[in-house]
Image (tube, grey):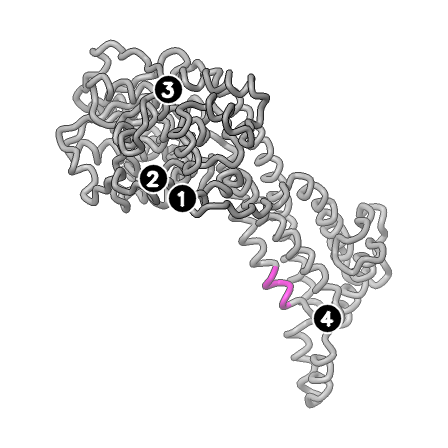
Amino acid sequence: MGVLGLTPFLQKNYPEVIKRLPDRLRSFRGKTIVIDGTLITQRLHFASMPWDHRHVLGWYKILQELKDSGVSAICVFDGQERNQAKAREAARRKEVRNLAVARGSIEVERLKRLRKLIGLVEECAQRKERERGGAVSALRGIVLGGRKGDAGVGGGEPVPPPESTPPPPEFQILGDIPSAFTSLYFEYCQSIPKLTSLSPKSPSPSSPTPAAQDEQESTIDQEQEQAEYAMSKQQLQLMVDEGKVWDDLIADQPKSRLRIVSAEPKKEIKPMVKLFPPRIDVAKATLISLAEKSSLISESYERRNNPPTAQTFEESKEIIRALGVPCLDSAGAYEAEALAASLVINGHADYVASEDTDVLVYEAPLIRNITSRAEPLTIVSGSNIRTVLDLSRASFIDFALLLGTDFSQRIKNIGPQRALKLIHLYGSIEAIIQQERKYSPRLPEKAYLEQVEVARGVFRTLPEVPDLSLLKARESDTEAVGEILQKYGLHRASGYEWDYDAALEGNYFEDNPSAR
């Protein structure tokens, strides 16, 4: 969603093109801002806030703040048609979503298992010492019996299903606890191959670049890989830690503890043993910590795996229109940011509010952080960037395509610094490929250049301005606004001070604005 690596490149090398406005919207009194409605709705939907219709509440708050600051707004949304040039990116996102669904399912199963195991450990701790020792001894037999010569949990073959493993005699006095332990351990063993099959390899360390100016180049290729790896790495660590709990549960009681207990006066031995059963106190604390971590990951996947629906967007448009703000859908294969840029470039608005840096390739001025009250707004002008980089319109588009967009793939080992240098030397992507054979596209050359030409067309062409009557603001319908808030159970919440930072924390739909 945007030009990969453009923002950090500008921050480091051309910070003067990024202007910060601490007084935020007060700087835009009397101006008109076109808001990328699709992106903002997505962010509000994925917010970690307690209301089911938080997107409606979020829009109400944002538009009220604009009104209070004397700023006019126009909201634009993606239309029904999708740009075929973005098919590759759409397919990639679908694959990522499917992977997230699978990982989320595994995490839900883990959380249930951990909670059951906590209860089971608590039950064991309340039993008599002899019963407890028998349970641990029998559990040790189950766990070790399910391995083939490996001392680590999960190192050998998993134990057979619980129904095919009759509880040892020692477990009979504990009722259902033996079979429960067996079942949970079996579930854990079964989860290992499921999770490891869905986990990408750790991003490999990159080789150092020959020149200091190219220090960013070697990391660009790994950014998407690292983003995908981060959540999976947390899940893998939980798997390892859960295995350690099983090891702790079946471990022999430390000799030092046994010696200390035997040295105590006779009447004090039993209370100590009851309060500190072998390994159970440590295991319980560890399990509680693991369950808390698993719960956070499960919640993150739950949000990620439930994207906004058509109804979500319609409900957002409902409150926008009730507040008197013009609300448009882009026509044809154009996306919202293209229509927003067209309105600004054709003089019908002053700025585009979005996090999508595609706007800059259209050379419209972009406002960022409009949804983060705690942070200053920033303004970046695409035309100013082109001037500072000393590029023509055509070479500026090619520079952006070399960095990577939703419409074009990057060429390996060409990041912002090297891309700018090569564009200055050769002027176009075709010339770079011909003159610098060591930089080969990932696709066959012909297919890549066809992709580049389509992407150029996306950024060269702006949608037509719609009927101007659609851009006129109306008076806010106070009664309709109240009815909408009431309908969605938000009437009281409308007075709530929306925490934009909390709302937008996390990266639930793989849009990291700081990287673009």
Question: Does the rendering let one see residue 218?
Answer: yes
Q: Disc number at residue 101? A: none
Q: CA distance from mark 3 to mark 4?
A: 74 Å
Q: Earlier in the sequence, mark 3 or mark 2?
A: 2
Residue labelled with disc 1: 505
Asked whether 377 or 18 is in front, the reply is: 18
Q: Secondary structure at mark 2?
A: helix
Where is residue 26 shown, x and y percent of the image?
Answer: 16, 38
Q: CA distance from mark 2 to mark 4?
A: 67 Å
Q: Secondary structure at mark 4?
A: loop
Q: Earlier in the sequence, mark 1 or mark 2?
A: 2
- Which quadrant of the structure image shows residue 416? top left
Asked whether 418 or 182 is in front, the reply is: 418
Tell me if 299 is positioned left or right of 169 in this view. left
- Which quadrant of the structure image shows residue 28? top left
Residue depicted at 76% across the width and 65% down the height: 136
Q: CA distance from mark 1 to mark 2?
A: 23 Å
Q: Secondary structure at mark 1?
A: loop
Residue labelled with disc 4: 128
Viewer-nearest of discs 3 and 4: 3
Q: CA distance from mark 3 to mark 2?
A: 20 Å
Q: Disc number at residue 459? A: 3
Q: Main secondary structure of the magenta part?
A: helix
Where is residue 92 shown, x and y percent of the image?
Answer: 55, 28
Residue labelled with disc 2: 10
The amino acid pointed to by label 2 is Leu
Figure quadrant of the N terminus? top left
Q: Label 3 neighbourhood size at 10 Å, few (<14), some (14-19), many (20+)?
A: many
* Residue range of the region highlighted in magenta in the rendering: 281-286
Q: CA distance from mark 4 to mark 1?
A: 48 Å
Where is residue 238 shown, x and y percent of the image?
Answer: 61, 52
